[in-house]
Image (tube, rainbow, N blue to C red):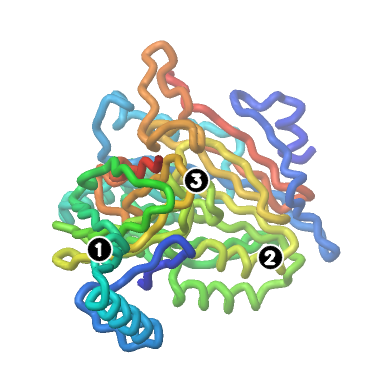
């Protein structure tokens, strides 16, 4: 099952090596940043642009944490790991979803655009308690 | 006098009549034979808990009420979640066998079963197929086409490419003007995605149905009546026979509505569906404590 994508989010397989044109341009950007840092000390800029990473654990029948504060406009990368089941991770308002295979970490990039509450839930039926496996991003 | 005329005149003994002018079954061709069937849904056999202190008594009450109908239906459909989910494959089969025993008391012996995710998602429909047969299929009755879909055996609650291809091939055999009834467990349209009340690839099924002029969908899953149109297609969800759920989107989570001792069985029920005539007509019944 392939992950959904949206303008606000994109999935990046962990440990993968980007060979696409997009990957090539990222590499070039890194080189430019490194060059600029060597010439005058903008390394802090490169660090500031790295999206914040947030770890989420999925386990029958809860996400931990299940309330996650975010800032509008701030790009983040979710590192989601399932401990016990092929749960789903679905953010309906962003039309963003992925499957969570146990033992693998899924990286999910997203940038909330507006303050408010963004619900997420497990959308792969996982047993008696599935209906309560959810959470939300609190965007300020 | 037709049965429906009689029911209208008689005030029908406990149910409420709703006419379905939404998707009439009138066709330009030959007249249809009127008939009716019964829909029961979300019985969750094996459930135990405060939301229904009479969990083992509610389904038998509905069976008795159906058996007491003055004229028997032509057939009966169960639109999924026959049993409550369990991780134990042996217990799942035990619940299914017990459910079959209970509904075996129905006088009408033509009964069609569909799975819900509680029956089929954890083992991809294996136990359901053993005890009830195919999870999706098509049949015809007195000029009305029926197509039963399985949007639960995939854990991701999709119909899947294989079933969609089958559906497309089956629909291609039908007169697009003929009445068509679709049976499924989950809503095919995105009712409340944040409660997982949708079918992930339901839009593809609805696209396949669009060329058909007279389509009515009967489904379960949401444990309450809900009526919605997508284009010219009417969608009617059924009440449950275990516990009601909150109205769409009105709570944080779709968790059971508490049992009210002052109004036991409130929100539970089943329906008759008049078909084959000019209109689809629903007759909704509650569950009585008696």
Q: Is residue B250 above or below residue B84?
A: above
Between A136 and A32, the one nearer to me in the picture: A32
Question: Which element is circle 3 on?
Answer: loop
Residue B215 in picture, x, y percent from top left: 67, 58
Please name the residue that numbered disc 2 is placed on. Answer: B210
Query: Horizontal placement of B177 versus B283: left or right?
Result: right
Q: Pointer 3: residues within 10 angstroms few (<14), some, or many (20+)?
A: some
Q: Pointer 1: residues within 10 angstroms few (<14), some, or many (20+)?
A: few
Identity of the residue drawn at 53% across and 56% down: B188
Q: Can the viewer see residue B109 in this picture? A: no
Identity of the residue drawn at 48% across and 27% down: B267
Q: Is residue B164 above or below residue B105?
A: below
**Residue occupying the far front of the picture:** A40
**Chain letter belonging to callout 3:** B
Question: Which element is circle 2 on?
Answer: loop
Q: Pointer 2: residues within 10 angstroms few (<14), some, or many (20+)?
A: some
Residue A85 in picture, x, y percent from top left: 20, 59
> Marks 2 and 3, Cα distance to the nearest angstrom?
22 Å
Please name the residue that numbered disc 1 is placed on. Answer: A44
Query: Horizontal placement of A80 versus B75: left or right?
Result: left
* Mark linked to residue B192: 3
Between A79 and A60, the one nearer to me in the picture: A79
Query: Horizontal placement of B197 versus A39: left or right?
Result: right
């Amino acid at each position: 099952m392939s992950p959904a994508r949206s303008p606000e989010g994109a999935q990046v397989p962990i440990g993968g090596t980007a060979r696409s044109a997009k990957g090539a341009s990222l590499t070039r950007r890194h080189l430019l940043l490194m060059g600029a840092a060597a010439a005058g000390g903008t390394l802090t800029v490169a660090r500031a642009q790295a999206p914040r990473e947030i770890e989420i654990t999925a386990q029958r029948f809860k996400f931990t944490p299940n309330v996650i504060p975010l800032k509008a406009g701030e790009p983040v990368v979710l590192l989601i790991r399932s401990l016990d089941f092929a749960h789903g991770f679905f953010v309906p308002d962003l039309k963003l979803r992925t499957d969570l295979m146990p033992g693998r970490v899924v990286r999910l990039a997203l940038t909330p655009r507006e303050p408010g509450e963004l619900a997420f839930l497990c959308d792969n039926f996982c047993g008696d308690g599935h209906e309560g496996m959810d959470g939300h991003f609190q965007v300020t | 006098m037709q049965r429906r005329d009689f029911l209208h005149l008689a005030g029908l003994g406990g149910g409420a009549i709703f006419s379905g002018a939404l998707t009439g079954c009138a066709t330009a061709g030959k007249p249809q034979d009127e008939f009716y069937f019964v829909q029961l849904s979300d019985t969750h056999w094996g459930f135990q808990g405060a939301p229904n202190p009479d969990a083992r008594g509610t389904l038998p009450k509905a069976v008795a009420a159906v058996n007491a109908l003055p004229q028997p239906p032509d057939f009966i459909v169960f639109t999924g979640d026959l049993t409550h989910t369990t991780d134990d494959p042996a217990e799942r089969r035990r619940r299914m066998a017990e459910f079959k025993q209970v509904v075996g008391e129905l006088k009408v012996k033509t009964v069609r079963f569909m799975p819900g995710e509680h029956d089929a998602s954890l083992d991809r429909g294996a136990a359901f197929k053993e005890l009830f047969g195919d999870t999706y299929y098509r049949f015809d009755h007195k000029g009305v086409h029926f197509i039963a879909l399985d949007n639960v055996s995939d854990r991701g609650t999709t119909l899947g490419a294989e079933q969609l291809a089958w559906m497309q091939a089956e629909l291609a055999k039908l007169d697009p003007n003929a009445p068509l009834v679709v049976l499924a467990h989950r809503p095919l349209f995105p009712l409340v995605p944040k409660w997982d009340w949708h079918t992930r690839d339901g839009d593809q099924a609805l696209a396949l149905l669009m060329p058909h002029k007279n389509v009515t969908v009967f489904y379960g899953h949401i444990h309450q009546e809900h009526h919605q149109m997508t284009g010219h297609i009417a969608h009617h969800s059924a009440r449950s026979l275990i516990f009601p759920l909150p109205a769409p989107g009105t709570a944080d989570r779709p968790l059971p509505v508490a049992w009210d001792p002052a109004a036991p069985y409130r929100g539970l029920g089943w329906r008759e569906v008049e078909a084959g005539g000019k209109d689809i007509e629903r007759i909704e019944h509650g569950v009585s404590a008696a």
